[in-house]
Amino acid sequence: MSSTLSDDFERRFHHTAQGHERTWVFISVVMIAVLFIAAVYLVVHDYGVVAKTARIYSDPNTPATLADFQGDGIKQTGPDSYSVYEMGRIWSWTPGTGKAVTLPVGSHVTFYVTSGDVLHGFEIQGTSINLTAIPGVIGHVSYTFDKPGTYYIICNEYCGAGHQAMIGKIVITGSKKA
Ligand SMILES: [Cu+2]
C-alpha cells in the first residue's frame, strides 16, 4: 500500500518536473536564437560587411574614386610607375582574373584595392603585399616588381563557396635590369 502511494507521488513529481524543464529549455533556446539572429543582423547591417551601396567613403590619403575602377584598371603614372585599381568580388579580382595584369620588370606599382561586396584579402604571393579589401573603402599599397615572372593574387580572407578559386595573375615581363 505504501509503495503504491510513493510510486504515485514519484510519477506526479516527475511529470511536474518534466513540464518545468521543457519550459526552461524552450526559454533558453529562444534566448539563444534571438541573440544569434540579432548578432548576425547587427554585423551584416551595421558594420559594413555587406556593401549597401556602391559608395566609396572619401579618404584624403587615398584620392582614388570609384570611377578609377572602371575600364581596365591600369594607369601609367610615370616612366616606370603604374596605378592598378583592384576590385574584389565573389570570386574574382578585376583586373587579374581571366586577363592577367601585364607590366614590364622594374615597374613601381601602387595598388588601390576595394571590394564590391564582402571582405576579401588581397595578397600577392612572393611579395609583401597583403591588405584587406573592404567595401566602401579604398586601401593602397606600393611595390616595385624587380623580378620578372608570374605573380598570383589570392584571396586570404574566407569569402564563400568559391573563395579558394579567387585568383588573379600579374605577369612581369622582360629581363632584370642591371
Ligand atoms: Cu575573396
Image (cartoon, helix red, strand yellow):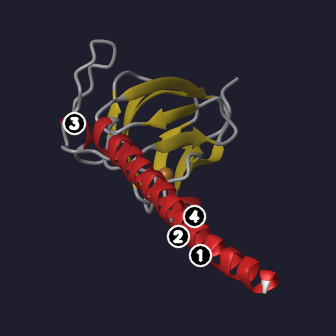
Q: Residue at x 65, y 73 (%)?
A: 14
The answer to whether marks 4 and 2 mark residues whose Cβ atoms lie closer than 8 Å is yes
Q: Is residue 48 left or right of residue 178?
A: left
Instruction: From the image, tell me which residue sits under label 1.
Output: 15
- Mark nearest the camera among 2 and 3 is 2
Badge 1 marks a residue whose secondary structure is helix
The answer to whether marks 1 and 3 mark residues whose Cβ atoms lie closer than 8 Å is no
Q: Which of 71 and 177 lies nearest the eye of the viewer?
A: 71
The answer to whether marks 2 and 1 mark residues whose Cβ atoms lie closer than 8 Å is yes
Q: Residue at x 59, y 31 (%)?
A: 129
Crowd band around label 1 with a 10 angstrom C-alpha radius: few (<14), some (14–19), many (20+):
few
Say what amino acid the circle numbered 1 marks.
Answer: His
Instruction: From the image, tell me which residue sits under label 4.
Output: 21
Is residue 81 among the parts visible in the rendering? no
Kindly report the distance in space between the C-alpha atoms of the residues bearing marks 2 and 1.
6 Å
Kindly report the distance in space between the C-alpha atoms of the residues bearing marks 1 and 3.
66 Å
Say what amino acid the circle numbered 4 marks.
Answer: Glu
Q: Residue furthest top?
A: 60
Instruction: From the image, tell me which residue sits under label 2.
Output: 19
Q: Is mark 2 within 8 Å of ligand 1?
A: no
Crowd band around label 2 with a 10 angstrom C-alpha radius: few (<14), some (14–19), many (20+):
few
Kindly report the distance in space between the C-alpha atoms of the residues bearing marks 4 and 1.
10 Å
Residue 153 pos. (x, y %): 56, 47
Instruction: From the image, tell me which residue sits under label 3.
Output: 66
- Mark nearest the camera among 4 and 3 is 4
Marks 1 and 3, the one that precedes in the sequence: 1
